[in-house]
Image (cartoon, rainbow, N blue to C red):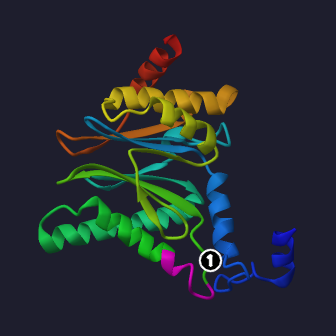
Amino acid sequence: MESINHQMMGYDRAITMFSPDGRLLQVEYAKKTVKQGSTAIGMVCSDGVLLVTDKRIVDPLVVTEAIEKIFQIDEHIGATASGIISDARVLIERAQVKAQQHQVTYDSQIDVLSIVKNICDLKQLCTQSGGLRPFGVSVLVAGIDKDGPKLFETDPTGIFFQYHAVVIGEGEDGIEEMLHKKYKPTLTIEEGLKISIDALRQVLDDKFNVERLDAAVILTVDKKFTKVDKKELERILKQVKGA
C-alpha cells in the first residue's frame, strides 16, 4: 500500500526526488530490472577467474555465435551483465577506452578496481541528476592484476562489492544457494565451470541447451582473457550430466 501511495504522490517520477522514507524509487525499479535479466555467474578459482552466462536466445533464427554476453575489457579483464544489455554495452565500451588510455599513458595494464570505480562513477552520477535515468544493469567485472584474481559486482546505484563467487539475474536466488553450498577457494577453473553450468542447467530446466551458454576464463599463469569454445562447453556438460 505504501508503494502505491508513493506512486500516487509522484515520488517515482523523478530520479532526484526522495520518498518520505528516504528511498529513490527509480533506482529501486532499475534494480528490479536486473532481477529480470538473463543469469550471469562469476567465480574466483585457485588458478584464475571465470564468467558464465545465459545468452537467453529468444528466436531460433538468431545466429547464436553472434550474441555476445561476455565482453573483453582488456587483455586481463572481462565483464558480463544482467539487465538492459544496451546499457551494459555503453558501460563496457567506456571501460575499454579507460583501459586503453591507461596503457598508452602509463605503459602498464590498468588494475581491476580502477575499471570498476570508473563504471560506478557514471552509474552513481545517473542517480542524482535530473533528466537522466539510472543504468538498468548490473555488471560483473573479473580480472587478474598484480594482486591476483578479482571479481566485482556493480549495481545500478553505483555501489560495488568484491566477491569470491556471485550470481546476478533471474536465477539469482536458486544459484546463490548452490554457490554457498559448493563454492570453495580451492576449486579449479574446470570445477568452477562444472558448478556454474550445472547451476544454469537446473535453473533453466527444459529451456537449457549448450547454445545458450557463454563462458570466458582468465588464468593466473598468463593473465589472458579467453572465451571457452562450444566443444569445451559440450565436454563439460557431458561430465555434469554423467555425475
Q: Residue 32, image x and y in percent? A: 67, 59
- Closest to the observer, 66 or 232: 232
Q: Residue at position x 43%, y 59% from top?
A: 161
Quarter in which the N terminus is drawn: bottom right
Taking the spot 48% from the left edge, 48% from the top edge, the residue there is 68
The outermost residue toward the front is: 21
Taking the spot 24% from the left edge, 45% from the top edge, the residue there is: 224
Read off the residue under disc 1.
133
Q: Nearer the viewer, residue 23 or 26?
A: 23
SS of the residue under disc 1: loop
Q: How many marks?
A: 1
Q: Amino acid at mark 1?
A: Arg
- Counting from the top left corner in percent of width and height, residue 213 is at 51, 35
Q: Is residue 199 visible?
A: yes
Binning the other alpha carbons within 10 Å of mark 1 as few (below 14), some (14 to 19) or many (20 upward) gives some
Indicate left or right for 116 with 179 as reference: left
Residue 95 location, quadrant? bottom left
Q: Position of residue 114 (x, y in %)?
A: 30, 67
> In the drawing, does residue 93 fall left or right of residue 224?
right
Q: Residue at x 61, y 57 (%)?
A: 34
**Residue 183 vs residue 144: left or right?**
right
Kindly report the secondary structure that dominates the magenta region of the rendered protein.
loop
> Residue 143 in the image: x percent, y percent?
30, 51
Q: Is residue 160 above or below residue 130?
A: above
Region of the chain picked out in magenta, as a range: 124-131
Q: Determine if the magenta segment contains residue 62.
A: no
Q: Is residue 124 left or right of residue 83?
A: left
Q: Quadrant of residue 29?
A: bottom right
